[in-house]
Amino acid sequence: MACLALLAALSLSNLALAQTIDDGVAVTPETVAPAVDTVDPDAASSGVDYFPFESSQLTPDVISNLTDYNLTSVELFDFSDTDAGAEKRAARVCKTYPGDKAWPSTPIWDLFNILLGGALIKGVPAAAPCYTDWPEYNAATCASITAQWETPRFQLSKPLGIQYYAFEGVSCLPPTLTRTGATCTLGGMPSYVVNVTNVAQIQLAVNFARNLNLRLIVKNKGHDFKAKSTGAGALSIWTSALQGIQYLGSTYTHPASGYKGPAFKIGAGVQALPLYQAASDLGLHIVAGNTRTVGIGGGYIAGGGHSPLSSQYGLGADQVLSMEVVLPSGRFISVDENNYPDLFFALRGGGGSTWGIVTSLVIRAYAKKPVSTLSYSFGINSDVSADTFWEGVYAVFAKFPEYADKGMYSYWSLSCFSDCAFAMAPQWANDMTSAQLKTLSAPLFAELASLGITVTDATYTGFDGVLSAIEGTWSAESEQTGVWNFNTGSRLFPRSNWDGGAKFSAQNSAIRTSAEAAGLMLGYNIKAANNPSVNQTNAVNPAWRQTLVHALLGVTWSQEATAADIAAANKKLVDMMQPWRDVSPGAGAYLNEADINEPNWQQAYYGSNYNYLYQLKQKYDPWGMMWAPTAVGSEDWYVTGQIAYYPTQNGKLCPQ
């Protein structure tokens, strides 16, 4: 039943009454069991057995059973279909918000929690113990929270914890980490969180939100620059606990794709580091990011997912063989080349919080190979002028086609807060020894020397594989979270710019201008390699297939910055990025690391795929159930109370 029809059928007075079953028996955890059925593990259409948490499902039989017991308000938890949703698309209204007459009463939330098996958490900001007007106030607890605030472990452990708070609205941070005199409100954080541990709980939450027209958000690890897993007045589905790493074997044959070889089935909540560890123990590599705590099955793969192995094997999204997914209708399905092939296309690179809630994935793996890294730096000094320095930088850039084609991944930065300096930190060479990398790098260092640039700190390090290289290159302490003082934009520079002539010169000039203006930029020399062993027909931005550099530019602001100050900085970033757009027409930006204010974001993030993806969004989510800024179809909605260039999630979500 569509949400508007349901709300018309259920009077508010009925919703406010205590919930009952047969003969007026009150609904309690003792009288009503969680709404879950156990499905055979081999029932998956994908041909890959369900994890135990996926065998626990909400089925039509469960709904029928609750109906037979005359459970009050059972309609709130029933499934819908896209045809019913399509009929209501034109009648979309603002999502129900706390304080609205249609907001669920406490007995309804209690009923929901009982059917969930006690998985519902009321939204409380993680820093609430630091504020005397919150009942959680405790000075000692606040001190502990403040000390841990910027660590991934802390943010990942909290129902409302996220990586970056700027675009949530900076509603509640520890007092020493936010503006002087700041208060604590729930702000752009969800009103309730479902800490899901099985598929049935996801289905219940989806159905409940759809039938009551609630805003629904999804959070895996909260690892997002733009706070996409937040939303005022929302019901949040927290998938972090969906764990499981299953090695399917070295001779595994995937039923739908026909792929034969090593593969893993992983839960959506699995982080990069334990998956790297599991693969390494088996003499394997997997394509994942260089940040240990990213959830592989969340926004990483949904947005494309670049990796130190991308120049060899392609992007993270390319590695997916199949997925298990809860749709906005509440149905639980298998998605692969044969089952819902259009969704299989969209879920791999078409953005997170858009198509459904992924519970598990099957991804392919590769034989473990050695890795070597090289770090070095050079800068402007008494012997190296600014122009000479930049000639050296351009000499490095000129090598990027060769390096990417050899399967390498180079992470570099330009710092121009005073005299400019370049740092390669590091260049990552897959399937190379340190001696081979040194030989490969010798021509570049000779060219730098001919310019009068002497590199004295070149450091070569060899590793037995990706895991040891990750652990030996980026420390756990280098992962900072819980901050709010910056914003980044990005651009994918195409191989066609390396023409040895006008395009290359124009690109170099644009990078120099922006780096000097911003003070700092980061870059990756990387390509999304062609890989015939996997299905690369997916929603990844087509610009990735032509890319040699993914570059990021940023702006910062002080801890005392007002909303107007942040908006001004963000406007400056849009303007500083324009030279990059000008020298890469028709290219784009990496969805997961791009500016929320990117002009013409549909083209920049999704390229020529956008119109098709928009059609799929209407097909599978005609209710507008799943929404996030810059997601496909997000232009159909807006958050109230925002100012230009500083959109936060602190407001009601309404249709345009």
Image (cartoon, rainbow, N blue to C red):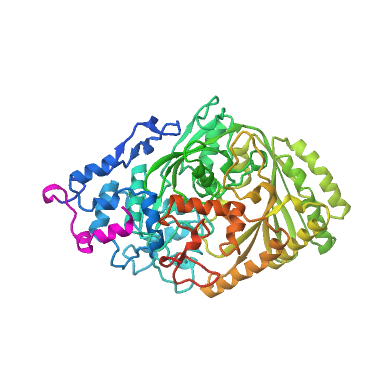
Choose top left, top right, bottom left or bottom right for residue 518. Answer: bottom right
Residue 61 x %, y %: 27, 40
Foreground pick, 252 / 410? 252
Q: Residue furthest right?
A: 450
Q: Residue furthest left?
A: 23
Q: Is residue 397 above or below residue 199?
A: below
- Count up the numbered dots: 0
Side of 564 where 542 appears, left or right:
right
Q: Which region shows up in magenta?
A: 1-25
Side of 643 where 366 appears, left or right:
right
Q: Main secondary structure of the magenta part?
A: helix
Choose top left, top right, bottom left or bottom right for residue 581. Answer: bottom right
Side of 14 where 403 appears, left or right:
right
Residue 173 x %, y %: 45, 64
Foreground pick, 330 / 297? 330
Foreground pick, 427 / 287? 287
User: Does the magenta-highlighted stretch encompass residue 16?
Assistant: yes
Q: Residue furthest top?
A: 251
Identify which residue is drawn at 58% across, 29% down: 283
Q: Is residue 219 above or below residue 575?
A: above
Residue 431 x %, y %: 69, 35
Choose top left, top right, bottom left or bottom right for residue 519. Answer: bottom right
Can residue 223 be seen here? The reply is no
Identify which residue is drawn at 63% across, 58% down: 490
